[in-house]
Amino acid sequence: MTTQKTNNLRMAADALIAAANSYDVERVLVLFTPDAVIDDPSTGHCFDGHAGISNYIEQYFIGYRTVTRFLSMEILGDNRAHVRVDFTGDFGHEIGSLKMSVNTEGIFVRIDASLE
């Protein structure tokens, strides 16, 4: 794994966290391909495409005033990483797991989210 690919994955994770923490749905959506998926079993839902991801951010980040903090990252492949994050908000505190996949441009195509 090249350092550049590791840096690209970390930059994608950091951009997502910053956008979600700003509660700016449009800023989040530009980080995802139009057909991207966020699968989050803790919510009981899979969120498809920009419409689904918009709903996910509005309901679970803006709605609960969620603040996300990066904890660690493990590289799983050229365009995949497992990111651990700390979530706080109106719900309390949780540690989350984001298995993220990006395309060659560093745009998210899939995130499998879970709570630890």
Image: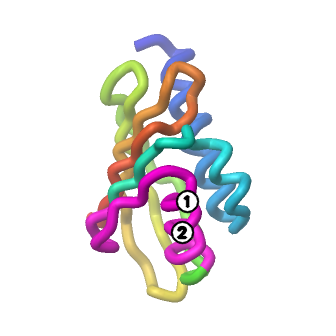
Give, as a three-letter code, the residue at label 1. Answer: Ala
Question: Any magenta on residue 46?
Answer: yes
Is the residue marked by circle 2 packed among few (<14), some (14-19), or many (20+) residues within 10 Å? some
Q: Which SS does the magenta portion mostly show?
A: helix
Give, as a three-letter code, the residue at label 2. Answer: Asn
Question: Any magenta on residue 37?
Answer: no
**Badge 2 is on which residue?**
55
Task: Tell me the quadrant of the picture where the C terminus can be found.
Answer: bottom left
**Badge 1 is on which residue?**
51
Between circles 2 and 1, the one closer to the viewer is: 1
Image quadrant in which you'd find residue 79: top left
Where in the figure is residue 70, as x and y percent of width and height? 52, 53
Residue lying at 46% horizontally and 37% vertically, measured from the top left = 109
Task: Tell me the quadrant of the picture where the N terminus can be found.
Answer: top left
**Where 77 falls versus 61 (above or below)?**
above
Residue range of the region highlighted in magenta in the rendering: 40-62
SS type, badge 1: helix
Query: In the image shown, does 30 or 79 lie closer to the viewer?
Result: 30
The answer to whether 70 appears left or right of 115 in the picture is right
Are discs 2 and 1 less than 8 Å apart at CB?
Answer: yes
